[in-house]
Image: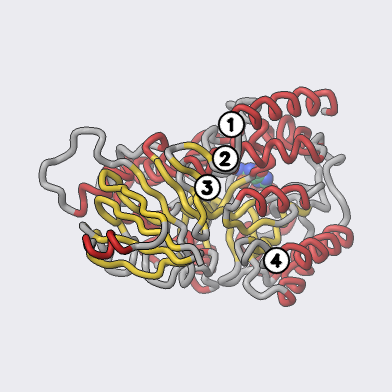
Amino acid sequence: MSSILIIPKRIIAADKKGSILKNYSVEIKDDRIARIEKVSAVKLRLFKGEIVHGEDLTLIPGFVQTHVHLCQTLFRGMADDLELLDWLQLKIFPYENAHDKKSLAASVKLGINELTLSGTTTILDMGTLRHQEVIFDELISSGIRAFAGKCMIDINDLFPKFKSTAKAEVNESRLLAKAFHNEGNGRIKYGFAPRFALSSSAKLMRETKELMKDFPSSIFHTHSSENTDEIKTVKKKFKKNNIEYFNSLGVLDDHSVLAHCIHVNKNEVNLLKNKRVRVAHCPSSNLKLGSGIAPIPFYLKKGISVSLGADGAPCNNKLNMFNEMRLASLIQKPKHGATAINAETVFRLATIEGAKALNLENEIGSIEIGKKADLVLINLDNSIHPLVEDDQSMYSRLVYSGNENDVQHVMIDGKWVVKNAKSQIFDQQEILLDANQQLKNLLKRV
Ligand code: GUN
Ligand code: FE
C-alpha cells in the first residue's frame, strides 16, 4: 500500500460547507483520501511514506471538464475567426477526417499534457469518427480520469466524406464500450457521443440510448443549441427546437450532458430542469465562435446542472480551466450585473458540479475522506492580495487572478501526473516534435 502525506498552506475543499482549512494535512492511501487532520509534529516524524511539503501551496480538488475534443488539439490556430458551421465544414471536419492513428495519438497526448499541467484531472471527451481505440489507449496510459467515446456521425451535409452508418456506429460503440468502460482501475468510462442533431440521425440517437442500458454509469454526450444557424436548420429539418427534438427521441435524462445550450426557449429550459439534463458550459468557445452567451445565471437559479469545459483547441484556443472559470463569471456581468455569478460559484462549477454532472460526486470533485485522490497543489500566494484572508478572497485568487502556470503538483487516482510543474507522464519536447511531424503528414491527407 502506498501512503502519501500532503501538508499544504490551506485546503479549499469544495465540500458541502465550502470549507477552507488551515494547518491540516491530507493523507492518501493508494488511490483515496484516507485522512484529513490537523498537522501534527509527532505524526510527521513517524509517518512512513512520501511527505509532500506544500506549506506555501494551496490544495484544491482537480478540475473536471465536461466537454473537450482531444482529437482537435493538433488543429489549434488553424480555424480561427469562423462561425460554427463554416468552422466545421471548412476546417474541422476535413481535418478530423484526415486523422490516422499516429496523428490522433499525437493530438491526444498534447491535449492531455496541457490539461493535466493546468490542473484538470477529469474530462468528458467527444472522441472522433475513426481510431477511437487510440484515444482510449492514450487516456489509460496518461493516468487521467475520463469519460470518452467514439464520435458517431451518420449524416453529414457539411462534409459528406466524414460519416459512417447508424448501424456501424452503434455496433462499433458497443464494442468499444465493452472493451474500455471501467478500465484503468475504473478511471475510464464510456461516454456515448453522437456529434449533434445535424450529424446523427434519430435512429442513431435512439439506438444509442437503448445501448446505454448495457453500460450503467455511461454518459450520453452531444452538442445542442450552440449557434443560431444550427438551430434554424434543426427546426427546419425536424420541426422542433433542438432540445425539444432530443426530448422527442427520449435521450434526455440525468445521464445526458449537452454542450452549450445557448439558444433555448422556455419549454427547453423546463426540459433541462425536469429531465435533470447536465449543461456543459464552454464560455471561451462560445465567445470565439461568436455563438452567444448561455443563460447560465438563469440555469443556476432554476437548479439546472451546469459545469465547465474548454471544448477543443481550435475554438478556444487554450484548454485550461482558469480561462473558463474567469470567463464564466465575467461574460455574465454586462447583462446581469456584477453580482451575476461570483467566484465561489464558478469554482464549484469547475469542481464538484462537474463531478455531479458525470454522476461521480461520491468519488471526485471535492477534498473529503473516502474520495479518490484527484488533487492539485497551486501557488496562490505569489502576488499581492488583500491582507485579510477571508474565504471570498481565496476564490477570488483562483477565479479572477488564477493562472495555469501557478499549478505545481497534480495527482490523479493517488498517482502524481505533474510534479514541480513538470509532467511525470510526457516529455514535452518529444510530444511537441511528434505533433509537428504528425500535423505535417496530416495536412498532406486533407
Ligand atoms: N458541434 C458539432 N461539432 C462541434 C465541435 O466540434 N465543436 C463545437 N464547438 N461544436 C460542435
Ligand atoms: Fe464541442
- Circles 2, 3 touching at the beta carbon (< 8 Å): no
Mark with earlier residue (4, 2)? 2
- How far separated are the C-alphas under marks 2 and 1? 8 Å
Q: Amino acid at mark 3?
A: Val
Residue at the (52%, 52%) spot, across then down: 65
* Residue at 78% across, 37% down: 102
Secondary structure under tag 4 reads loop
Q: Tag 1, which secondary structure?
A: helix
Q: Classify mark 1: residues with Cα within 10 Å, few (<14), some (14-19) or many (20+).
A: some
Quote the CA–CA distance across marks 4 and 3: 22 Å
Helix, strand, or loop for circle 3? strand
* Residue at the image point whose x is 46% and y is 69% from the top: 361
Q: The residue under label 4 is which amino acid type? A: His
Where's residue 357, x and y in %? Answer: 51, 64
What is the spatial separation of the Cα atoms under label 4 and label 1, in whole angstroms?
29 Å
Q: Between label 2 and label 3, give the one nearer the viewer.
A: 3
Q: Callout 2: helix, strand or loop?
A: helix
Say which residue label 2 marks: 113
How far from the left and from the top, in percent, is residue 30?
50, 65
Q: Tags 4 and 2 in contact by the CB under 8 Å rule?
A: no
Q: Which mark is residue 417?
A: 3
Taking 118 as reference, is 305 above or below it? Answer: below
Is residue 346 visible to us here? no
In three-dimensional space, the C-alpha distance between marks 1 and 3, rounded to whole angstroms, equals: 13 Å
- Label 1, on which residue? 428
Query: Comparing marks 4 and 3, which lies closer to the viewer?
Result: 3
Q: Is mark 4 within 8 Å of ligand 2?
A: no
Q: Are marks 2 and 1 in contact (CB under 8 Å)?
A: yes
Marks 4/2: CA–CA distance = 22 Å
> Which residue is tagged 4?
181
Q: Earlier in the sequence, mark 4 or mark 3?
A: 4
